[in-house]
Image: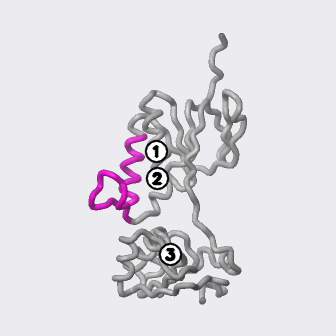
Amino acid sequence: MQPPAPTDYDVVIIGGGAAGLSAAIYTSRASLKTLILDSIGCGGQILTTDVIENYPGFPDGIKGPDLSIAMCTQAKKFGATMEHDQVLEVSSLDREVKQVTTYSGTISTRSLIITAGGSPNKLGVPGELEMAGRGVSYCAVCDGNFFRGQEVVVVGGGDAALDEGLYLSNLASQVTLVHRRDELRAKPISQERVRENPKFKFLYSHVVEEVLGSDGVQG
């Protein structure tokens, strides 16, 4: 019987959010050499969430960055390693040793767990990409302070849109919610909060067709 082929890690986990960190806690506690890769950092999109109210054990909610720190600390306590890097390719998935290629190099692993999570939805309209970072943002927690005291527009009627809008209402002078349907589809508690918030203005049955501006968003 041949000995196992040598690898850099026993387990590589792509994605450092709640799912990836939970997996890392289990694998590292089982004495498996574990690496977590995430392009955002330890915690993934939890880092960009203001308050999390639906995570068990925190009846009053918890700040996203605080939960991220706690989960990362727990995973590292058992020996997991975290790297802030972008995965470019995975290969040799049908072989004993898998290959993960990142900007920093190639990593070999015996097992691969993918918990890549999601990414922001884009509108796909003219001017959007050109104005990204110049008035168009996909993260209220990251960029909200840039819009302090200004009027902002949030596009969407689901949970993410309302949560981002509620966060921005603490900073902006007015939050206009643009939704393509004639009613919101977020969870009832979020709908109640935005309707009771005097800073919100609603544009139902509307869609964004273009983002206007040159040095910044103008309309």
Residue type, numbered disc 2: Gly
Numbered circle sitting on residue 201: none
Local secondary structure at mark 3: loop
Alpha carbon separation for disc pair 2 and 3: 26 Å
Farthest residue toward the front?
182
Residue name at image x 57 percent, y 50 percent: 116
Quarter of the figure with the N terminus: top right
Badge 1 vs badge 2, beta-carbon distance below 8 Å? yes
Numbered circle sitting on residue 157: 3
Can you give x and y, in whole percent of width and height, for residue 68 in the image?
41, 53
The residue tagged 1 is 21
Q: Earlier in the sequence, mark 2 or mark 3?
A: 2
Of discs 2 and 3, which sits in the foreground?
Answer: 3
Of discs 3 and 1, which sits in the foreground?
Answer: 3
The answer, for residue 142, to whether it is visible in the render is no
Q: Residues within 10 Å of mark 1 (few under 14, many from 20)?
A: many
Residue range in magenta is 51-75
Q: Nearer the viewer, residue 179 or 160?
A: 179
Residue name at image x 51 percent, y 49 percent: 16
Residue type, numbered disc 1: Leu
Farthest residue toward the left?
60
Q: Earlier in the sequence, mark 3 or mark 1?
A: 1
**Which image quadrant for residue 217?**
bottom right
Image check: 37 left or right of 191?
right
> What count of labels does the image hold?
3
Q: Earlier in the sequence, mark 1 or mark 2?
A: 1
